[in-house]
Amino acid sequence: MRRLFCLGLILSVGAVAGCSDTPPTGQPSFDAAAGSGGGTTAGGAGGNGGSGATAGAAGGSAGNDAGADAPSLGGSSGGGAAAGISGTAGTSGSSGTSGAAGAAGTTGAAGSGGAPQLAPPAPTGLVALNSDFSTTSLSILSTTGGLLHADCVDSATGSSGGSSKTISGNTFLPSQPQRGGDIVIVDSGNGALTFVDPAQCKIARQIALPGGAKTNPHDVVIVADTKAYVTRYDKNLAATTVALAGNDVIVIDPTSGTMTGRIGLDAYASAVSGATIQARPDRALIAAGKLVVSLNEIDSSFATYGEGKVVVIDPTTDQVVAAVALTGLYDCEGMTYVESTKTLLVACGGPYGSQNQPLQSGIAVVDLSASPPHLTRSISSVAFDDRPIDFAWVVALPLTGGGTRAFAVTNDPSFTTPDALFAFDYVLGTTTQFATSDPYTIGQPAGVSGLLLVPEATFSTPQIKLFDVSGSPHATTGFASDPVTGLPAVGVTWY
């Protein structure tokens, strides 16, 4: 697969230098306010008796409760109205007329309740994905930047001794933590999802995905016990049914892998003269209560690119409700989301091999709070070091006091100039380079308050390097992520 080519090649030739300082991505929560109920009104009082009258008629009817408004996924129902009080009977009299009936009690007002909103679960820990693109292992990390459990599971875990690997060398970790607390491996090579219990370091279960490896699954978002979305990056040209087709987002039961729905994305592929572009849904995450998917937009031969795009899917209808063109940017994939401002950042690498690649590479900044969502600005890779941004990732990590800081890395398509790690302000567009490493060795980092854990897959000293980012970013120390297998870390994420 094209995304493995660069790192696979550099691992095969062997890199020697390390990072150096240089001056210059539980349960999903569904939050809704409780509904408030309506008022009460008493019935009217009975009439006074007249001379020789029969008994006065009783008073009014009870008020009805119309205040219930219970959201289906959270938020309690509103309270209803109290019953009206019966009118008092008229006293006896002689020859009088009956007392007038009391008025009926008024109905309670309808309760108000906010609609539930889908949100990712809170993260519970850090995991390193280690790989040489043939074999894979996971290591559990501490949130203070240390190794808790090397080689938690690997490609041989659970194997019965056959030639097939339980976990292939072509794997991804989801863009966000998943409900249930397990680490979920998206195994493109095996066409499966693997669920790992991080406490016991064992494989809890594996499920096969419709279409298998031929559809090249890239990400998963689990939204309920029996519902998950999977992006299928490749179109399966040999498919005989839509269940095997690929180039789509499918809805599955994550307990069994059974497909329950499909969201086709052919309509969102770019129109390019002389080529047929595939939408190529890539990474996916929960943002602003919706499912957001990046479209990589490349033809079947990986020679012609369409303009990058993200689509927004409503999880209540499983329909695309918005599509945002990332104007001027190509080869877009990795995403990070800032909930406080509902800002989405997308990393775009530009058309590989093109003379204009740096001009068509950069960071897209999308406002998801607007209706419809829209691209607010792009930060060209020219603003970094005039080399393409790594399309695989971008990480937002503000300073302790807040702000609009994020991190990205640039690569040299010729494999000669070192990777360069940058901090940047995604509102101001300012950038600061603070470290370098061998070409195509810096993988996706994860951040905690004041600390950035950066995987560095060099041959000489593969490690996770720690950077103090409480102020101006600077390197502190590092550690091997899997001294048991010797595999280098290629990504660090929250689970």
Image (cartoon, helix red, strand yellow):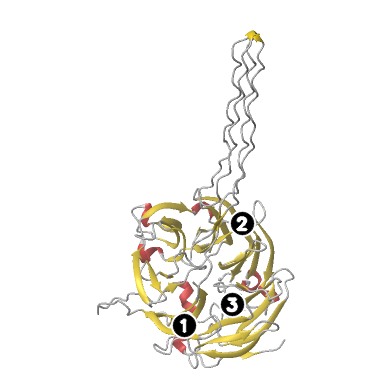
Of residues 464 and 223, the one drawn nearer to the viewer in this rendering: 223
What residue is at 55 percent from the left and 64 percent from the top?
305
Of residues 302 and 466, the one drawn nearer to the viewer in this rendering: 466
Of residues 466 and 204, the one drawn nearer to the viewer in this rendering: 204
Residue 115 picture location, percent across and down: 58, 49
Considering only order in the chain, which callout, 3 or 2, is on the residue closer to the N terminus? 2
Residue 447: mark in rendering: 3
**Dots 3 and 1: beta carbons under 8 Å?**
no
Q: Residue under circle 1?
A: 9
On screen, residue 265 above or below 429: above
Say what secondary structure mark 2 lies in.
strand
Judge whether residue 261 can be spotted in this image.
yes
On screen, residue 39 above or below 75: above
Quarter occupied by residue 421: bottom right
Judge whether residue 270 can be spotted in this image.
no
Q: Which callout, 3 or 1, points to the residue nearer the camera?
A: 3
**Residue reaching furthest top?**
95
Cα distance, mark 3 to mark 1? 28 Å
Residue 10 picture location, percent across and down: 49, 85
Q: Which callout, 2 or 1, points to the residue nearer the camera?
A: 2
Quarter occupied by the N terminus: bottom left
Determine crowd level at label 3: few under 14, some 14-19, many 20+ residues with C-alpha closer than 10 A: many
Residue 324: mark in rendering: 2
As drawn, is 194 to the left or to the right of 301? left
Q: Amino acid under label 1?
A: Leu
